[in-house]
Image (cartoon, rainbow, N blue to C red):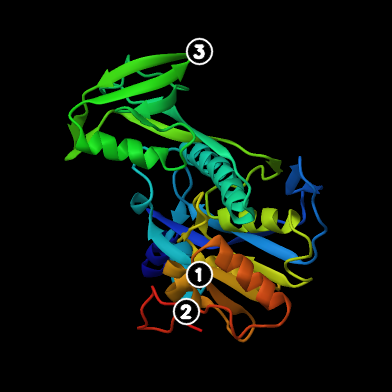
Amino acid sequence: MTYALIALAVLLPVPYMLQLPGPVFNTLGDYRDKPMISISGAKTYPTDGEIDMLTVAVSGGPGRDTFASQALGALLHGHETVIPTEAYYPLDTTREDVAASNAVEMSSSQDVAVAAAMGQLGKSYTVHLLVDEVVSGSPAEGELRKGDRIMSVNGKKLDSDPDAAQKLSEAVKSSDSVDLVVERGGKNVDVSLKPATVEGRKAIGINMKQDFEFPVDVSFNVEGIGGPSAGTMFALAIVDELTPGAMAGGKHVAGTGEIDPAGNVGPIGGARQKVAAATAQGATLFMSPADNCAEVLKAADQSKITVARIDTLADAQNAVEKYAVGDTADIPKCPADGADPNEKGQ
C-alpha cells in the first residue's frame, strides 16, 4: 500500500512550472529555410559566424500539468528551475492568453531592437505614441480611442519624442487635469481628462504603444517564438548586417537581454537555462545583462564559455568585436560574488 501511495503521489499534478533550456537560433542565419532577419532599404554586408538568441522551454503553466515527479527531477537537475505558477500568472490565465502575450512582447521587442540598432548606427528615426487600449470605466473611456496618436500633453509636444510615454506618465502623476491633443482620422482632437487614483497612483486608463518609422525596412522570421529577451541579439545582428566587416569574425557567440530604444540592456528570466543551452550548442562567448550575472556565473561552465557583462548594446558590440580578434582581457566581466554589480570588472 505504501509503495502504491508513493507512486500515486509522484503522478499528481502540482501548481508549478519548470523552466528548461530551450531551442537556440542564429540571428544571422535561417529559420525554417528563410533568413531570421531581412533588411532592405540600405546596403548590407556579409556576416560570418553565429550570434545566437536563446529561449527557455516551459513545462506546465496555464493549461498544462506538471507532475510531482517532474518537479522533483528538476530540483535535482542543475539547469532546470521550479517556480510556482501563481508567481507568473493569475489563476484565470489561459494557455491562449500566454501565447498572445508572448507574441505581443516579441513583436514589441523587434521594433525596439531596430530602434536600438538605429541609435547605435547613428541613423535617425521617428516614433509616435499611440493609444493601444482604453480601460473600461476609466476617465479615458468614451474620450480616447484605440489608435489615437498622442500629439501633446498640457501644451508640451510628445509626437516624435522617444521619451513620450514617460513624459505622459509624469504629466498624469503630477496633474489634476490632463489636456491632450490626439490625431484621429487625420484631424487633431482636444481631450481633457481628470486622472483617477487607482491603488494609490493616478491614471487616465490607457495602455500605450510606440509606432516607429525607420529609415530601413527590417523583417523578422520568428513565428512561434515569444517574449522580449531576444531584443539585444536582434539589435546586434542588425548592426552587424549594416556595417562593413563580420562582427563575430567567424566565432560562435550567444547572449540575451531585453533592450530599450536607447540601447540599454535589462535583465531577463531563465538566464541559467540560456547559458546552459548556449554552451550545449557550442557558443564560446555568452553576453549576460548585469542583473543576471550572479545566476549566469553560478550556472556557466567557464572552462567552456566566456561570460561577458553587458549594460548596453555598445557593450555587446564591443564584446563581440574584441572576442572575434582574441582580445578577451578587455571584455567587461561579470563581477565576482560580493562585488558591486554597478561596477564593471575587468
**Callout 2 touching callout 1 (CB < 8 Å):** yes
Q: Identify the mark nearer the N-term, 2 or 3.
A: 3
Rendered image: mark on residue 298? 2
Residue positioned 71% across, 82% down in the render:
326
Q: Earlier in the sequence, mark 1 or mark 3?
A: 3
Q: Give the Cα distance between marks 2 and 3.
A: 54 Å
Q: Secondary structure at mark 1?
A: helix
Residue wearing tag 1:
272
Measuring from the top left, give residue 333's x and y in whole percent.
52, 79
Q: Earlier in the sequence, mark 2 or mark 1?
A: 1
> Is any part of residue 12 visible from this angle?
no
Write down the residue under mark 3.
185
Residue appearing at x 51%, y 84% in the figure: 346
Task: Give the spatial CA distance, label 2 vs label 1.
Answer: 8 Å
Judge from the rendering whether residue 308 lies leftward or rightward of residue 39; answer left or right.
Answer: left
Q: Residue at x 29, y 28 (%)?
A: 154
